[in-house]
Image (cartoon, rainbow, N blue to C red):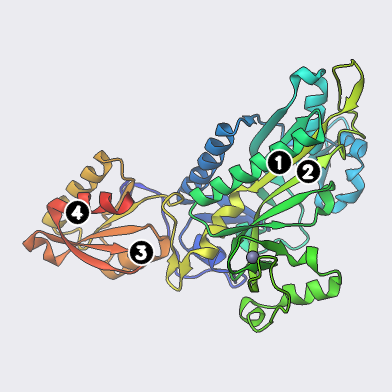
Amino acid sequence: MKFTKFFIQTQKDAPSDAVLPSHQYLLKGGFVSQEGAGLYNYLPLGKMVLDNIRNIVKEELDNAGAIEVQLSFVTPHSLWEESGRSETMDKEMLRFKDRKDNSFVLSPTNEEAMVNLVRQRVKSYKDLPVNLYQINTKFRDEARPRFGILRGREFLMKDGYSFHTSTEDMIREFNLMEYTYKKIFTRLGLEFRVVQADSGAIGGSGSKEFHVIANSGEDTLVICNSCDYGANIETIFEDESEVDALNELSYEELQNKKIEQKCSCGCKLSFKKGIEVGHIFQLGDRYSAPLKAEFLNKDQRKENMQMATFGIGVSRLIAAVIEQNHDDKGCIWTKTTTPFMCEVIVSNAKKEDELNAGLKVYEELKENNISTLIDDRVKERFGFKMKDFELLGFPYAIIIGKKLQENIVEVVCRRSGEKTDVAIDEVVAFIKDKLV
Ligand SMILES: [Zn+2]
């Protein structure tokens, strides 16, 4: 892609309410733009990241045997009355009426709709188990939308729902999804922890959260320094005010807090901050009982289906990647989430030899299936282009500049800052090598 033909507008400043790095950099880099309180547009670069994440989520779920559907974003209010959540979710649900005075809700989550769909179609134990998922827009009317797309009102979520003939089979699928989620977050290049969690408003018994470790996270975790044990403090401190007090502390302040208790493995525990990006629940018959989602067992008797539900905050993951991967100059995308792997920066695009050499490298990278942006802007100075590269955060830049006379270009690694002179004929092989 050529910068001059694309749609990127970087900005010098972020709005004053943008306190988190992801909020600042995603707006400054033109990945997203704000449309209203908690409402965001995805501009081309942001959409590319969103699609990268979405594709990995879909690939791994499909591999695990889950089946994709797409439910209506608008759900009849009557469904929420049937499950009893019309009252418990209350103001988070954006309700409206159509011209015939029927009440509707913009889906904040889809347990009810999915149970409704399955109860109409699944009749026998022979039709089970089934795990249906969608990657779809959700709307929650947050009282305080903030932190950009980390806590927006409208967001993209992967929500999956599985239905079973027995608790054992439901737990089997729950474990399979835990394994699948770990694969997803690993492929996204994230440092994360799976922790025991409270079930909150969704209800049900067993539940686990997936947290991206980041100093700016809203949740406080206790994790073991040597094994993979982790817990949300909500589950280990009984006193709610103690939990609130710890959640108020910054990451730096938390590091001064010592934990007397040791992990069951015998090693030290420490506090970390996490951003919740996934949550899996064993629901049992929490929804299937009130909504009468039944099947005929082998003895032709009716039983409630056993259910589990699995969520991933797809759009929130964009912000989580940046909260974990940034510096004071801008974003540092992971290799699987970045919109472009490489940027060719033509130092002075008025010089024909520089521009042509840049275009040649650019074409060669494309031929090798390395997604590349070429900064071919004529008016912008080199320093400005470098600042944009650092803000946008693609993994590598190839700078076509002064040393072109000696057939040398400079490769910059965004994450390490390392700069390497490479012969122009060898630069594509050099980049390919880095991507293995
Ligand atoms: Zn341990």
Cβ atoms at labels 1 and 2 below 8 Å apart: yes
Q: Give the spatial CA distance, label 4 vs label 2.
A: 51 Å
Q: What whole-number distance in Å separates the C-alpha atoms at marks 4 and 3?
A: 16 Å
Q: Residue 383, located in which quarter of the rendered image?
A: bottom left
Q: Residues within 10 Å of mark 3 (few under 14, many from 20)?
A: many
Amino acid type for the residue under numbered disc 4: Val
Of labels 4 and 3, earlier in sequence is 3
- In the image, is 318 to the left or to the right of 211? left
Which quarter of the frame holds ligand 1? bottom right
| Callout 4: SS | helix
Front disc: 1 or 3: 1
Q: Residue at x 88, y 44 (%)?
A: 85
- Residue 311 at x, y percent in the picture: 68, 45
Q: Is residue 79 above or below residue 210?
A: above
CA distance for labels 1 and 3: 38 Å
Q: Which mark is residue 414?
A: 3
- Estimate the spatial distance between the alpha carbons at disc 3 and disc 2, rounded to whole Å: 41 Å
Task: Determine the CA span between mark 4 and mark 1.
Answer: 46 Å
Residue at the image point whose x is 78% and y is 60% from the top: 143
Residue at x 75% of width, y 19% of height: 127
- Residue 148 visible somewhere in the drawing: yes
Q: Are marks 1 and 3 in contact (CB under 8 Å)?
A: no
Q: Which mark is residue 174?
A: 1
Q: Earlier in the sequence, mark 3 or mark 2?
A: 2
For label 4, the crowd category at 10 Å Cα-Cα, with few meaning under 14, some 14 to 19 and many 20 or more, is many
Q: Amino acid at mark 3?
A: Arg
Looking at the image, tell me whether mark 1 or mark 3 is earlier in sequence order.
1
Query: Mark 2 — residue?
Result: 282
Hey, what amino acid is under mark 1? Answer: Phe
Give the residue number, with chain letter if any, for mark 4: 427
**Eye-nearest disc, 4 or 1:** 1
